[in-house]
Amino acid sequence: MKLIIGLGNPGKQYEHTRHNIGFECIDALAEKWDSPLNQLKFNGMYAIVHRPEGKVILLKPLTYMNLSGECVRPLMDYFDIDIEDIIVIYDDLDLETGKLRLRQKGSAGGHNGIKSLIQHLGSQEFNRIRVGINRPPAGMKVTDYVLAKFSKEEDPIIDEAVNKTVAAVESSLSKKFLDVMTEFNGA
C-alpha cells in the first residue's frame, strides 16, 4: 500500500495559497482517480483508492502544516505502511515557481511541515516531491508570502506543475522512485 501525502493548511482562507500546493496536488489526484477524500481519521482527510498497481491512500493532514507528523505517523501505523511507501508533496521556496524536485531524503530545509514529519517518523529518508513557489519579493515576510494566493500570471505555471506532480505520482506506482526522479526532476 502506498501513501501519498499533500501538505497544507485546512480552511477556506488557505485554499489556493502557495503553502497549500500539496493539498492541490492531492485534490487533482482524487479528481482524476474519481476518489473523493471522504474518510476522516487521525485528524486527516483521506481516500483509499484501488488502483491496478495496488491500494493507494491519498491524505491531507488537517493538523495545520506545522503539526503534519501528528496525523501521518498514526495513519501509517494503523494501515501498516512502511516509510519507503510514502511520498510527501509540498511547497519549496528555493525552487523557481512551478519547478519540481524529487528526492528520497533530506533535511527539513526550514519547512515546518517536513520538520514535523521528520520528528514523528524518526527519519529524514522518505520520498518527496517539492513544488517550487519561489522566494518572496524584497521586503515581504516569508509567512505573508507563503500564505498568499498565486498571481494570475503564476496560475497556468502552477496548473502545469500540479499536472506534472500527478504524472510523477502515477509513474511512482509502477516504477522505482529513483527512476521517477530521473524522469521528472527539473520538470
Image: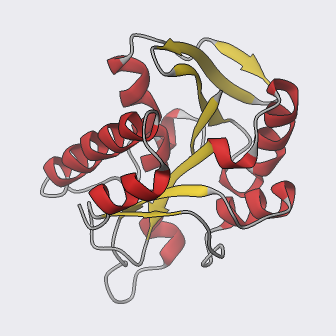
Residue 174, position as x, y percentages in the image: 43, 34
- State which quadrant residue 93 falls in: bottom left
Relative horizontal placement of residue 84, taking residue 67 as reference (left or right): left
Q: Name the foreground residue: 74 vs 16.
A: 74
Q: In the figure, 116 relative to 166: above or below?
A: below
Q: Position of residue 146 (x, y in %)?
A: 46, 63
Q: Can residue 148 be seen at all in this image of the molecule?
A: no
Q: Is residue 103 above or below residue 3?
A: below
Q: Quadrant of the C terminus?
A: bottom left
Q: Answer left or right for 185 relative to 115.
A: left
Q: Nearer the viewer, residue 14 or 105?
A: 105
Question: Which residue lies most toward the bottom here?
Answer: 138
Q: Quadrant of residue 98?
A: bottom left
Tally of marks: 0
Above/below status of 42 relative to 16? above
Q: In the rendered view of the protein, which quadrant contains the N terminus?
A: top right
> What sort of colour scheme is used for the picture?
secondary structure
At x 62%, y 73%, the residue is: 106
Residue 35 point in image, percent of width and height? 47, 12
- With 52 as the anchor, is 11 left or right in this view? right
* Image: 107 above or below 157: below
Residue 135 visible in the shown view = yes
Name the residue: 42% across, 48% down.
21
Q: Position of residue 172 (x, y in %)?
A: 44, 41
Q: Residue at x 85, y 55 (%)?
A: 120
Residue at image x 33%, y 62%?
Answer: 182
Q: Is residue 111 left or right of residue 136?
A: right
